[in-house]
Image (spheres, helix red, strand yellow):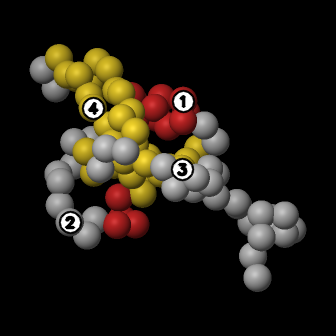
Amino acid sequence: MWSPEAPTKGRKIMKRFLVFSYQDYYPLGGAADFKVDVDTLEEAQGWLENNYFCCANVLDTKTGDRWGVEAERAGTAITKVELVEGKP
């Protein structure tokens, strides 16, 4: 059985926050929308500021909390990304 304390033998361990981002809202995107795993919420926000698509979510694998994204745009450029807790 897996545990966080188990030896990894060179395998990558998933980081705490998972970032999902996709072009259009659609059901059943699932794992195909996974982009990156990071250690902090700030890293997730930073990644999204540089790689944001139309829609995004961040999942905290430790607590189960989730964040949706609100983005400010200037034309097609993203000027600000804000994580909103509990937003689907």
Dot 3 amino acid type: Asp
Determine crowd level at label 3: few under 14, some 14-19, many 20+ residues with C-alpha closer than 10 A.
some
Q: Amino acid at mark 4?
A: Glu
User: In the image, residue 54 lies at what x, y percent?
Assistant: 22, 42
Residue 11 image point, x, y percent: 74, 66
Q: Would you name the residue on which mark 1 appears?
A: 42
On screen, 11 above or below 77?
A: below
Neighbor class of circle 1 (other Cα within 10 Å; few <14, some 14-19, many 20+) is few
Crowdedness near tag 2: few (<14), some (14–19) or many (≥20) residues, C-alpha within 10 Å: few
Labels 3 and 2: the sequence-earlier one:
2
Measured from the top left, where is residue 56 in percent x and y?
A: 32, 45
Of mark 4 and mark 3, the one earlier in the sequence is 3
Looking at the image, tell me whether mark 2 or mark 1 is earlier in sequence order: 2
The reply to whether discs 1 and 3 touch (Cβ–Cβ < 8 Å) is no
Residue 16 seen in the current view: yes
Q: Which tag, 1 or 3, sits closer to the chain's start?
A: 1
Quadrant of the image for the N terminus? bottom right
Q: Residue at x 54, y 36 (%)?
A: 41
Mark closest to the chain's N terminus, 4 or 2: 2
- Tell me the element at label 4: strand
How far across and down, in percent of the image, does residue 49 sit? 39, 28
What mark, if any, has residue 70 been given in the picture?
4
User: Which residue type carries mark 1?
Assistant: Glu
Q: Quadrant of residue 38?
A: top right
Q: Are marks 4 and 2 in contact (CB under 8 Å)?
A: no
Q: Distance from label 1 to label 4 (Cα)?
A: 15 Å
Where disc 3 sits, the SS reads: strand
- Residue drawn where x is 43% and y is 48% of the image: 66
Q: Which residue is mark 3?
A: 60
Task: Name the kind of residue labelled 2 in the image.
Answer: Pro
The residue carrying mark 2 is 27
Identify the element where label 1 is drawn.
helix
